[in-house]
Image (cartoon, rainbow, N blue to C red):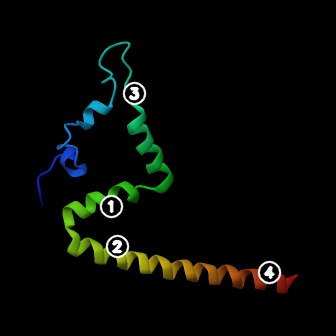
Amino acid sequence: MRDASPDMIWGFESCGMDICSWFKGDGTKKNDPKTVNIFLGFFFVVNYCLGTGFLGIPYAFFYSGYFAAVPALLFISVVSWINANYLLEIMARAQVSDEYNR
């Protein structure tokens, strides 16, 4: 495993950005609540809407490499597609069964 900081993982070390600077206050002072700026807030909203995998996949690619991550991603995509087809088949059969029993 590589020893990397979060800044290095997301590529911010080259542009001089520090992830900790995204937080406006550290909450140590009485009138200084810990708040988040709009940039980090946007990523929190995207993460909540799309799930944790959306932001976790680049992290996994970084540590596993492309030769392991790409086949794993393709395998998971195929399994998800098969499960979606099974779910659609079950829903169609349930609808036909429900209409037949009425």
- Position of the N terminus, as image quadrant, is bottom left
Image position, residue 92 (x, y; %): 70, 82
Task: Note whether 41 is above or below 68 in the view shown.
Answer: above
| In the displayed structure image, the side of residue 86 where residue 30 appears, left or right | left
- How busy is the neighbourhood of tag 2: few (under 14 within 10 Å), some, or many (20 plus)? few
Question: Callout 1: 10 Å neighbours few (<14), some, many (20+)?
Answer: few
- Crowding around mark 4 (Cα neighbors within 10 Å: few <14, some 14 to 19, many 20+) is few
Between marks 1 and 2, how big is the CA–CA gap?
9 Å
Q: Nearer the viewer, mark 4 or mark 2?
A: 2
Say which residue label 2 marks. 73
User: Hey, what amino acid is under mark 2?
Assistant: Leu
Instruction: Give the Cα distance between marks 1 and 4.
Output: 40 Å
How far apart are labels 3 and 2 at the CA level?
Answer: 35 Å
- Mark 2 and mark 1 in contact (Cβ < 8 Å)? yes
Q: Between tags 1 and 4, which lies in front?
A: 1
Query: To which residue does mark 4 refer?
Result: 98
Q: Gap between marks 3 and 1, in whole Å?
A: 26 Å
